[in-house]
Amino acid sequence: MTGAMTSAGGGVWRVGTRASALARAQAATIAAALTARTGRPAELVEIATVGDSSSAPLPAIGGTGVFVSALRDALLAGTVDVAVHSYKDLPTGPAEGLAIVAVPVRADPRDALVARDRRTLAELPPGSTIGTGSPRRAAQLRLLGLGHDVVGIRGNVDTRLRKVAAHEFDAVVLARAGLARLGRLGEITETFDPIVMLPAPGQGALAVEGARDRAEELAAALAAIEDPATRAAVDAERTVLGVLGAGCSAPIGALAEVVEGEDGLELSLRATAVDVDGTASIRWSASGPVSAPAALGRHVAAELLAGGAADLVGLSGTLLPAAGGTTR
């Protein structure tokens, strides 16, 4: 390994992370990968973000980017070598001076219910209080028309689960991937099929970010964990979000998967835009080459916009042509 592969911290890889238990668990897997590839020790550097320090609803404190801006500042300042993000928290636009240097294999992207008395969603009676901090989850829950009282909730996974145990909520909806990384899958009472609830673009995936001028060396150090299928799927999903002009807190769901098609592997993408009150929705699906995820994302976003997604959700998206590639 050349000298360029060393970090500025005396040969110790400095892995930037939020301070939550989930964020540290996610970052620890990246730290271990760096050590395994390079033989150099790695340490986690906890960085406080606006999203962690405020209990206000995400749109009120800035929405997209509230969990990542401080980590990105640390990268640009050179105080960490890489930063580990939940991919769904990243703004869709490029970050000047930074690059995504690795995308590991995605965990299960679906949403999950944790309810009192081990109940499923259908078993919760009308009027039951379901907590979620996601407008996307709230809108899709309301769309089901089961008569539940869907209310906002903030806090880490432990905080939300305690509110169910303390009977403050009848249930909460969380990302299954987060519960898996914390070893708490046993608390799930139902995992939602994407037909019922499409996950957030990028949900279950991690993004490892580094300085653009070190992208090549960092990518080489993390090559063993790079998963092209996950990167392609997330690129397609996030392109939908970007074209629609929506942030990570918008009621937009999207899920792409590499599947076997008529002519070999292809990328299949489903996306939806839902009125925040759960009174209406638009859904579209298409497939295309794995090598052209952005084109597929633009096509699906264009169909959503043509169906009235901008008016439905109050988006700023504009119809963009799909450059290159085909969709079916």
Image (tube, helix red, strand yellow):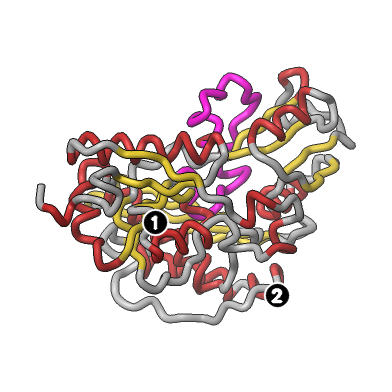
Q: At numbered mark 2, what does the secondary structure look like: helix, strand or loop?
A: helix
Majority secondary structure in the magenta region: loop
Mark 1 Cα-neighbour bin, 10 Å: few <14, some 14–19, many ≥20: some
Start-end of magenta stretch: 178-204
Secondary structure found at label 1: loop
Q: Nearer the viewer, mark 2 or mark 1?
A: 1
Q: Is residue 233 visible?
A: no
Amino acid under disc 1: Thr
Dot 2, crowdedness within 10 Å: few (<14), some or many (≥20)? few
Q: Is 31 positioned to the left or the right of 21 in the image? A: left
Above-or-below relation of 64 to 148: below
Residue tagged 1:
79
Residue 311 badge? 2
Q: Is residue 323 left or right of residue 278?
A: left
Name the N-terminal-most of marks 2 and 1.
1
| Residue 246 place in picture, x, y as percent | 59, 68
Which picture quadrant has residue 325?
bottom left
Taking the spot 44% from the left edge, 59% from the top edge, the residue there is 74
- The answer to whether mark 2 and mark 1 are in CB contact below 8 A is no
Which residue is located at x 85 percent, y 34 percent?
A: 128
* Residue 196 belongs to the span the image colors magenta: yes
Measured as percent of width and height from the top left, residue 47 is found at: 52, 50
Please identify the residue farthest to the front as the structure is shown.
10
